[in-house]
Amino acid sequence: MRTKWWVFPILALALSVYAQEPSFSGTIGMDFLFAPAGPLSMRAGLTLTMDMGKGGVKSQTILSLTGLEAEHLWFWLNFQGVNLRSSLVFDPCFSRWSLSVSGGCCPFFLGGWFFLGNLALACQTPNYTIGLIFECGAGGEPGFLAQSLTGFGIQGLEYLIDDDPWTDVVLVPGWYFEEELLRFVWSAECWRLYTTWMFTYAGLGFGELGVSYRFSPPTVDLGASLRLNSAFSLDWAKLQLGVTVDPVSVYSATAFDFFGLKWEEIGLKIQFSQVLIYSSTRFDLSGLVWIKVGFELKF
């Protein structure tokens, strides 16, 4: 537990010294998650980001009714076309450390991740394992992007390419081949098409197809996606709608399958200068799943 308190300031200082650009910016925010299903669950997350030109640090502290639940730390450094990333996760004892290196010569890029994880329950006798991910691809967005991720001792590679920075991969015992993810994207300023395919040692894991389009003004985002399972039957489909009329943004995401509605999520964001206020609510056929509210300040 003590390790995380001195790792954070030392690496933050090292990044600030190395950064060649004098700019300094960051954000601080807090969110609250309420989940009424079953026993009432409440969680608070405090997030701090510091961007120092070519490097930066991000921290997220998660608190629940029982006290400290988890601490997430991210560090990044960019120089001469090479990107370094590292993360530490405590839950609240050591859970995972990762280091990634990526770079390339346009339009090609290469990357790799190394993970050291603890498979034991929180604060129990450690059970360490390692995981490796290799990445290669070409292109970028907007334009055409082709990307390949290969995981050994790692599951959930799709979490590395989603839009949620807090999700992460899952380490499993051993460091054998687990997953291969292939992604292809074709995009422009106002539209985006993509397909993602996941393969495991047993064969096809899933296939995902998606399309989105943006109208303006006012800004309206429409999107649709679906996922097929290993039997090529529908796993889920999503419809997304977002409308932005400064300073207010509203979005809706609906997921369903052949049996009907899986869940519905509605969100609201209000941006005033350096202040962002947001909320999101998810419910399914059984009722309210969770409510999340938060704010973010830029400096």
Image (spheres, rainbow, N blue to C red):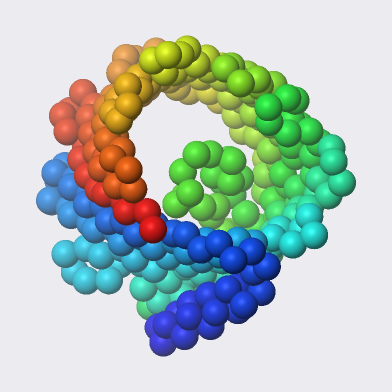
Answer with left or right where residue 23 lies relative to residue 178.
Answer: left
- Residue 205 spot, x, y in % from top left: 61, 33
Image-quadrant location for residue 174: bottom right
Q: Is residue 62 visible?
A: yes
Which percent across, then down, holds residue 237? 45, 18
Please, is residue 214 above or below residue 284 in the view?
Answer: above
Quarter of the image for the N terminus: give it: bottom left
Please name the residue shown 72% across and 44% down the image.
Answer: 149
Q: Residue at x 50, y 39 (%)?
A: 163
Q: Nearer the viewer, residue 215 or 131?
A: 215
- Image coordinates of residue 276 in percent, x first then y, are 30, 44
What is the residue that sits farthest to the front in this orientation?
22
- Which residue is located at x 44 percent, y 59 percent? 26
| Residue 174 visible at all | no
> Residue 289 sits in which quadrant?
top left
Residue at the image position 69 percent from the left and 60 percent from the top:
78
Count of number-bearing discs: 0
Tell whether 183 sits left or right of 48: right
Pick the residue in front: 240 or 234. 240
User: Residue 244, position in %: x, y?
Assistant: 35, 23
Relative to residue 189, is residue 139 depicted above or below?
below
> Which quadrant is the C terminus positioned in?
bottom left
Near-viewer residue (202 or 172): 172
